[in-house]
Amino acid sequence: MSCPVILNYLGSVTSRGDLPVSGNTLGDVRFVRDDSLQYYWSISSSTGSLADWKVINGPIISDDEKSFHELLNEYKMALETSYETYSYTGSRLTLKEVWTDNTLTTKLFSRTFSYTGSRLDSDVVTRISDGVTLTRTYSYTGSKLTSVEYS
């Protein structure tokens, strides 16, 4: 079976035996630290076996990219149970903040977006509790996105 087109990176686990066999969606991806390989959930059923996790052939993502996606996944999970505020410059979203609730007393995350003209240049996610900040920087040739770098 070939790798699905749409992949959803969900973070890492320590060993292959820690890959979940239920609650999965076709295309879910997890990084296994013990063998430094990425695995994807290869079936449409949400429940299966370890054999349904297939190795992704190709280069392993960088530690910075992996860290960014893990932090972004944590950010997305926080969105499900918390309160968000948005800031705009003109019509462009420049800041999203995630709070524990609508009293805005405890901030969980901030996410800033920087632009040059109409192009998104960077996406910066910060976890407020420990100050961890990770950046995704976009490069273009003409109007075409040519690379994404993580730091």
Image: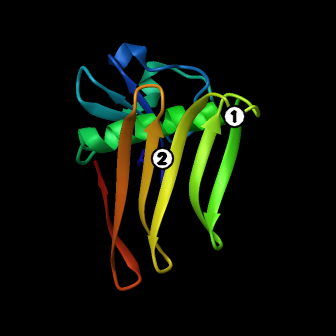
- On screen, residue 18 versus residue 59, left or right, reads right
Residue at position x 40%, y 32% in the image: 131
- Residue 40: x and y, percent? 43, 36
Q: Are marks 1 and 2 in contact (CB under 8 Å)?
A: no
In the rendered image, which residue does mark 2 sit on?
7
Q: Is residue 43 visible?
A: no
Residue furthest out toward the right: 102
Give the vertical position of 143 relative to 110 (above or below).
below
Observer-nearest of 16 and 2: 16
Identify the amino acid type marked 2. Answer: Leu
Identify the amino acid type marked 1. Answer: Leu
Give the vertical position of 4 relative to 82 (above or below).
below
Observer-nearest of 28 and 55: 28
- Residue 53: x and y, percent? 43, 29
Give the vertical position of 41 relative to 86 (above or below).
above
In the rendered image, which residue does mark 1 sit on?
104
Q: Residues within 10 Å of mark 1 (few under 14, many from 20)?
A: some
Residue at position x 42%, y 44% in the image: 1
Tell me which numbered mark, 1 or 2, is placed earlier along the sequence.
2
- Residue 87: x and y, percent? 63, 57
Q: Secondary structure at mark 2?
A: loop
Q: Is residue 121 visible?
A: yes
Residue furthest out toward the top: 17
**Disc 1 vs disc 2: which is toward the camera?**
1
- Residue 120: x and y, percent? 46, 68
